[in-house]
Amino acid sequence: MEEKEKKFTSVSIPVPLFEKIKKRINGTGFTSVSDYVTFVLREILAEEEEDEGEEPFTKEDEEKVKERLRALGYLD
């Protein structure tokens, strides 16, 4: 099976941010700022994909909140 050709693009970030990341990755397994930024972005996107389609509250959660608000006198 042939290895897929990897394609890359450039993204500009402010120099002070680059320097902070460079210091942060010192002594880690990351070999470059680019590797670290790629890792972080993949993590963020993976988290968002996990959250897609999920309702912020289930009907059960909504009912519990309403009960609490009624008990506190905020709802009739």
Image (tube, helix red, strand yellow):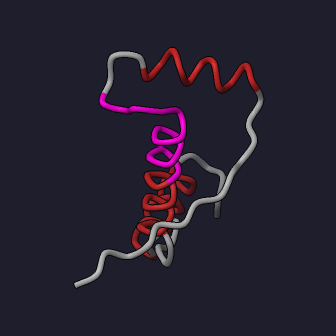
Residue at 47% in and 38% down: 36
Residue at 54% in and 66% down: 7
Residue 16 rendering spot, x and y as whole percentages: 73, 19
Residue 17 rendering spot, x and y as whole percentages: 68, 25
Q: Nearer the viewer, residue 47 or 35?
A: 35
Residue 51 versus residue 33 in the image, above or below: below
Mainly helix, strand or loop, the magenta region?
A: helix
Residue 64, by quadrant, is bottom left
Residue 68 versus residue 19 in the image, above or below: below
Residue at 28% in and 81% down: 2
Q: Is residue 46 magenta?
A: no
In magenta, the rendered stretch is: 29-41
Residue 72 versus residue 1 in the image, above or below: above
Q: Nearer the viewer, residue 76 or 30?
A: 30
Q: Is residue 35 magenta?
A: yes
Residue 14 versus residue 45 in the image, above or below: above
Q: Horizontally, is 22 left or right of 2 in the view?
A: right
Q: Quadrant of the N terminus?
A: bottom left
Q: Horizontally, is 70 left or right of 47 in the view?
A: right
Residue 33 rendering spot, x and y as whole percentages: 53, 33
Residue 61 rendering spot, x and y as whole percentages: 43, 65
